[in-house]
Amino acid sequence: MTTAVALPLRPPAHRVDPRAVQWWRLQGLAALVVLAGPQLVVWIVLGGRPSWLLVTTIVTAALAAAYTLVVPPIRYRIHRWEVTDEAVYTLSGLVVREWRIAPISRVQTVDTEHGPLQQWLKLASVTVTTASARGPVAIHGLAAPDAAELARVLTETTQATPGDAT
């Protein structure tokens, strides 16, 4: 018979790396190019007509630029994570806050990811997969060495923790 361990309900202790703000801004700039670029190209190809297409391009660019400037620092203040001997905790979300707690005994896999922008900024993401229907717990925007160490620690901790991991 196993006894349930009471997990502390408190905000996670660690913030992501400050370079995550740059990463999120670069992602916003890429979205700006993807959204406004084709509109601008079509407007140019059509010889500067219709004028409403230029207006929608400017509005799209202004909204994407505002998002790129304002949202990443707010995300940095919100996103937190922590790993204890009992669980992996994450807090994320700008509009809808998501607080995830994954018991260590339920962890099935631990993965790290380094996309092109992350590699350039020396960042990484750690994804902790459990048997939860809600999907994996992800920690984005960690310094690459911290992500590697976190994956190592989580792997060792889960191997040493009795449980069914389902």
Image: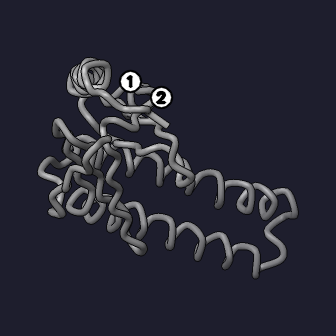
Residue found at x 53% / y 54%: 134
Please state which amino acid type lies under the numbered disc 1: Gln
Q: Residues within 10 Å of mark 1 (few under 14, many from 20)?
A: few
Q: Check disc 1 and report the residue beneath it.
A: 119
Q: Is residue 152 above or below residue 28?
A: above
Q: Secondary structure at mark 2?
A: loop
Which of the 4 image quarters holds residue 93? bottom left
Q: Quadrant of residue 86?
A: top left
Rate crowding at label 2 as few (under 14), some (14 to 19) or many (20 or more) other CA atoms within 10 Å: few
Q: Are marks 2 and 1 in contact (CB under 8 Å)?
A: yes
| Residue 110 visible in image | yes
Can you give x and y, in whole percent of width and height, for residue 96 in the image? 42, 73
Mark 2: amino acid: Gly
In this view, the residue in front, 51 or 73, is 73
Image quarter (top left, top right, bottom left or bottom right) of the N terminus: top left
**Quarter of the image holding residue 79?**
bottom left
As drawn, the residue found furthest toward the front would be 1
Q: Which mark is residue 29?
A: none
For residue 100, side relative to residue 60 (left or right)? left
Query: Which residue is the site of mark 2?
Result: 115
Residue 98 picture location, percent across and down: 38, 64
Q: Position of residue 68 (x, y in %)?
A: 40, 60
Q: Residue at x 28, y 49 (%)?
A: 21
Residue 122 in view in this figure: no
Between 44 and 105, the one nearer to me in the picture: 105
Q: Position of residue 51 (x, y in %)?
A: 77, 79
How far apart, in angstroms, are the residues tagged by discs 2 and 1?
A: 6 Å
Give me the residue at 45% from left, 64% from top. Answer: 65
